[in-house]
Image (cartoon, rainbow, N blue to C red):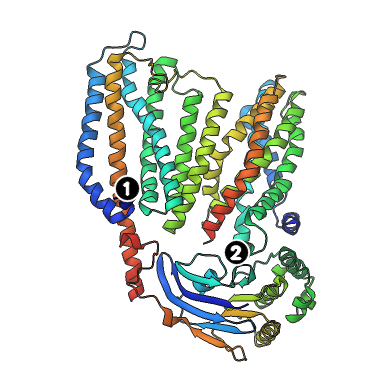
Amino acid sequence: MSIWQYANPVKFLALSTRVQPVIWTAAVLCVAVGLLWGFFATPDDARQGATVKIIYLHVPAALMAINAWFMMLVASLIWLIRRHHVSALAAKAAAPVGVVMTLIALITGAIWGQPMWGTWWVWDPRLTSFLILFLFYLGYIALWEAVEDPDTAADLTSVLCLVGSVFAVLSRYAVKFWNQGLHQGTSVPVATGGRSVADVFFYPLVVSMVGFGLLFLALVLYRTGTEIRLRRASALLARAGRES
Amino acid sequence: MELRVDNLTIARGGVPVLAGVHFVLPAGRALVLRGPNGAGKTTLLRTLAGLQPALSGQISGAGERIAYAAHADGLKAMLSVTENLQFWAEIFGTRETDAALDAYALRPLAERMAGTLSAGQKRRLGLARLLVTGRPVWVLDEPTVSLDTAAVAQFAAALQTHLAAGGSAVIATHIDLGFKAATLDIASFRAASTLLAGASDEAFL
Amino acid sequence: MTALLARDLRLAFRAGGGFGLALAFFLIVVVLVPFSVGPESSLLAAIAPGVLWLGALLACLLSLDRLLALDFEDGTLDLLVGAPIPLEGALSVKALAHWLTTGLPLVLAAPVLGVLLNLPLAGFGWLTASLLAGTPALSVIGTFGAALTVGIKRGGLLLSLLVLPLYVPTLIFGAETARRGAMGMEATTPLAMLTGITLATVALMPFASAAVLRMGLR
């Protein structure tokens, strides 16, 4: 029994339909608990006041915006190497979710930035990088929509995802070089173990981040299921056309 | 060296169209493909030319020996007839264009821009391109479209010269070329609609 | 390969080949800038390096959809795949031809247009150097975009959408070199980064371009 058996669309659908209710419930629960806890049960920040509470939306969304692209990169590689259709369709399904996460991060960032920095938008490296990431998502989705043959579309978008990832990292460094920036450092640095937010703010943030991760997973499973059913419908139509 | 095709299965748009295609084409022979529209002639020819992968089966004696010609001739309107031929001759490393010009009576048109040629004249130039490739196996998709009877005769003559010199050709055409050639009715290889051959849509059925 | 280069250059120079269109576009963009931001010399001098870089980038982008689309329509690409030259090489040559007919004229025209925008004297050398180092990357990355969209009808707009984000690092380092140079600052660091990007893309992008072209032609 290897994990690759779920590369079969039928088996994947069966499993994902079974686990989806659990994941949806957990996702809604975590997001609700994280946001409510964060908004109503934490004190105002000494300097930032109540505006800091947008962190419970902003940080998880930003986290998932990047992780969605990373997931697409892995899925694209699996498609290019092992030719599993589910992988390509999962990458396709994740892109719009990633775009929405990027947009949430950008918009909440602007709303947070207005009282803090006195302006809705600055060309800060982090903000700029997210804007560039947003453009990459748009190009990726547009390419999927433009190519008629689904396998060719999967091939082309996978290579675009690979090349785009390299250029996205390159842009990140270029943008850092170009403008040093206002944005505060990472809120939850994993590598160093230290953190710049106090525990009262940190725990609801973690719950919210887990919730966003689960929400992303649930949405991608759901959308991948839709894509598989669409492909199945068109495959059946194509075969039926050959019989007549 | 012969062109050998064994148990070839090919797909178009993710659906298998032909299955179990097999033939042997010895040097010096031509093979005419017949079959109704949509039977998979173009797909088979493109597979032979290496432009798309087969689902299964073997092709031997193809690859770098194939010269492919389809509906689009790869001609540039803003280059003269000679320049067009010379370009392809250089790409294929032959440099010899005189024979090709003569075979299709293109000499009077040699300095004309390809864009000013009629459809039939362009087609002749496209077929003349085959001669400058120096490749032994011609894979031709409807080569006589828009040719008049005189030009068809030029094509038949060029083809016979090519075969006499040890070349071979696979041709999808509906007209009679005026000499005896083996025919292969590809309708007999039509893939059953229930066939599972590893086509890309199969995983979803 | 030289045959392919010679043919592409010849086609570009013949009537209808589109040579000079990019240059004319560059000129018009630069002329329109003072109309949109006002004629003040100090303002124009400040934005000149950025405007010239952006104009050159857009002019380059404008000519990309002809790079492979014409060869696709007339069947040349199908025949090139079967030809005894590697597709990676063929695409590198096509990118080179694109640079020679688009990028290089832009590099040569930029200092002249710099005069129109009151570019400070110190900036001319850096501007030319940065364009010379950066425009080959624009052509090579553009070839990748053209190969991605080759089978798509009306792929022009999509091509811009795909290529522009890929142009970001080149634009940043290129314009930064020109800007620092014009302000009399040290500009060798961004110039070195820019050259690095160009060398890396020239070395690696043709493989990606050939891969997507083979996928697209299938």
Q: Residues within 10 Å of mark 2 (few under 14, many from 20)?
A: many
- Quarter that holds the N terminus of chain C: bottom right
| Residue at the farthest top position | A46
Q: Which residue is mark 1?
A: A3
Chain of residue at mark 2: C
Please tell me which residue is depicted at 40% across the width and 70% down the height of the picture: B16
The quarter holding residue C13 reads bottom right
Image position of C192 with respect to A89: above or below: above
The residue lying toward the viewer, choosing from A109 and B139, is B139
Kind of element beneath mark 2:
helix
Marks 1/2: CA–CA distance:
39 Å
Q: Say which residue appears at 44% left-offset and 66% top-offset.
A: B55
Q: Residue drawn at (50%, 43%), measured in percent from left and top?
A: A162
Q: Which residue position is annotated with label 2?
A: C78
Residue A219 image offset from top left, x and y in percent: 29, 41
Q: Secondary structure at mark 1?
A: helix
* Neighbourhood count class around disc 1 (C-alpha, 10 Å): few under 14, some 14–19, many 20 upward: few
Q: Is residue C173 visible?
A: yes
Disc 1 and disc 2 on one polypeptide chain: no
Determine whether, in the image, residue C113 is placed left or right of residue B195.
right
| Residue A23 x, y percent position in the rendering | 23, 38
C137 with respect to A132 (left or right)? right
The amino acid on which the numbered mark 2 sits, given as a three-letter code, is: Asp
Q: Nearer the viewer, residue A138 or A172?
A: A172
Disc 1 residue type (three-letter): Ile
